[in-house]
Image (tube, grey):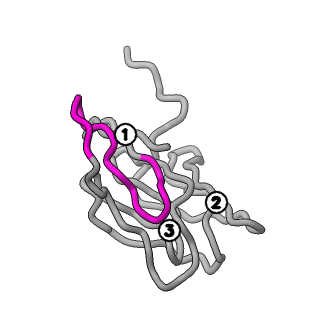
Amino acid sequence: MGFVSLARTYSHRATSRLYNEYTVAKQSDRVFADLRGSEPGVPDGMKVDVAGNIYCGGAGGIWILDPQGKKLGRIVHGQPATTNVGFGGDDWKTLYFTSRTHLGVVNVKIAGTPVPTPKKS
């Protein structure tokens, strides 16, 4: 599951499409993003960066989507499926990912949402 707080949207993975399940107080069956393709992989392992962009496994790698579901890019890592992703490192700009048999890492330009979220003063 991933939470996009800027858009007040809760998204989850379902087969090869992401649905916008809850926006403010309104239910919707709108397809958020379709991550199908000719390469192996299905939606799995979703995380959100500080700009509200979503990182999720999909066909051919890790898809990067904006808060509206538009594809910004894809990280191709050469493994058959992404099973999870997570941000880390001192600046939260390191994206770790797993496949069925591999642990990988890639540096990104936008920091991930820190977990746990720092307390506001």
Give the number of callouts.
3
Q: Nearer the viewer, residue 57 or 104?
A: 57
Q: CA distance from mark 3 to mark 2?
A: 9 Å
Disc ID at residue 58: 3
Looking at the image, is mark 1 or mark 3 earlier in the sequence? 1
Looking at the image, is mark 2 or mark 1 earlier in the sequence? 1
Q: Amino acid at mark 2?
A: Thr
Look at the numbered disc 3 and give the secondary structure of its residue. strand
Q: Amino acid at mark 3?
A: Gly
Rendered position, 63 above or below 69: below
Residue 36, how many percent across, how many down? 44, 74
Q: Amino acid at mark 1?
A: Tyr
Circle 3 crowding by C-alpha within 10 Å: few under 14, some 14–19, many from 20: many
Residue at horizontal 46%, vertical 47%? 112
Circle 1 crowding by C-alpha within 10 Å: few under 14, some 14–19, many from 20: some
Disc ID at residue 77: none
Q: Quadrant of residue 121?
A: top left
Look at the numbered disc 1 and give the secondary structure of its residue. strand
Q: Nearer the viewer, residue 15 or 42?
A: 15
Kindly give the residue lying farthest to the bottom in the view shown.
38
Residue at horizontal 32%, vertical 35%? 5
Q: Nearer the viewer, residue 18 or 104?
A: 18
Residue 35 horizontal side relative to residue 39, left or right? left
Residue 106, how many percent across, how many down? 57, 65
Identify the residue position indicated by label 2 in the image.
83
Q: Quadrant of residue 37?
A: bottom left
Identify the residue position indicated by label 1 in the image.
10
